[in-house]
Each structure stands twice: as structure tokens, then as C-alpha cells.
């Protein structure tokens, strides 16, 4: 089964819903795809992932 950007988006929604704040999920997806492709967030460095998320905080 191929991992898609939709799968990535779903993982990001799950992660951000479990944290405080609101985020531009589409912008997070775009940044990760541009840097790494459509990958499982578990393959990313945790600090890098949350730094990307933090850059796209909306509230």
C-alpha cells in the first residue's frame, strides 16, 4: 500500500488535535512533502516535525 499525502494529512490532524493550539494543517503537509515527500510522520525527527508544526500555528 502506498503512503499518500492524504495519509500524511490524517497523521498531522491526529497529532495536532492531541496538542494545544490550532494549526494550518495544509501548510504543514506542504512543507513536509516539499522537504521529504509524502512520508509517515514517525520517520521524521520529532523535533523537526514539531518545529514545522509550530511555524504554522494559527492561534
Image (tube, rainbow, N blue to C red):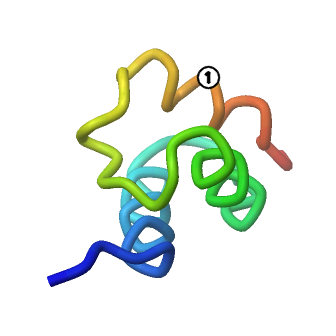
- Left or right of residue 42: residue 15: right
The picture quadrant where one finds residue 26 is bottom right
Residue at the spot 51% in from the left edge and 54% down from the top edge: 37
Question: Which residue is tagged 1?
Answer: 51
24 vs 7: above or below: above
Quarter location, residue 21: top right
Name the one closer to the observer, 39 or 57.
39
Residue 23 spot, x, y in % from top left = 71, 53
Residue at the far right: name it. 58
Q: Nearer the viewer, residue 33 or 29?
A: 33
The answer to whether 20 is drawn above or below residue 4 in the figure is above
Image coordinates of residue 8 in percent, x first then y, are: 43, 65
Residue 49 position within the rendered picture, expressed as x and y whole percent measured from the top left: 49, 31
1 lies left or right of 43: left
Callout 1: helix, strand or loop?
helix
Q: Residues within 10 Å of mark 1 (few under 14, many from 20)?
A: few
Identify which residue is drawn at 62% across, 59% down.
29
The residue at the point 59 percent across, 54 percent down is 33
Position above or below: 46 against 10: above
Taking 36 as reference, is 22 left or right?
right
Report the quarter where the N terminus lies: bottom left
- For the residue pair 17 and 3, the one nearer the viewer reads as 3
Please name the residue shown 85% across and 49% down the image.
58
Residue nearest the observer in this picture, 45 or 33 = 33
Q: Position of residue 18 (x, y in %)?
A: 39, 52
> Dividing the picture into quarters, in which one does residue 53 lie?
top right
Amino acid at each position: 500500500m502506498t503512503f499518500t499525502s492524504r495519509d500524511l494529512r490524517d497523521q498531522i490532524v491526529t497529532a495536532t488535535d492531541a496538542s494545544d493550539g490550532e494549526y494550518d494543517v495544509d501548510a504543514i503537509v506542504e512543507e513536509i512533502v516539499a522537504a521529504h515527500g509524502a512520508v509517515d510522520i514517525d520517520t521524521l525527527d520529532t523535533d523537526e516535525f514539531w518545529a514545522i508544526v509550530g511555524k504554522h500555528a494559527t492561534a
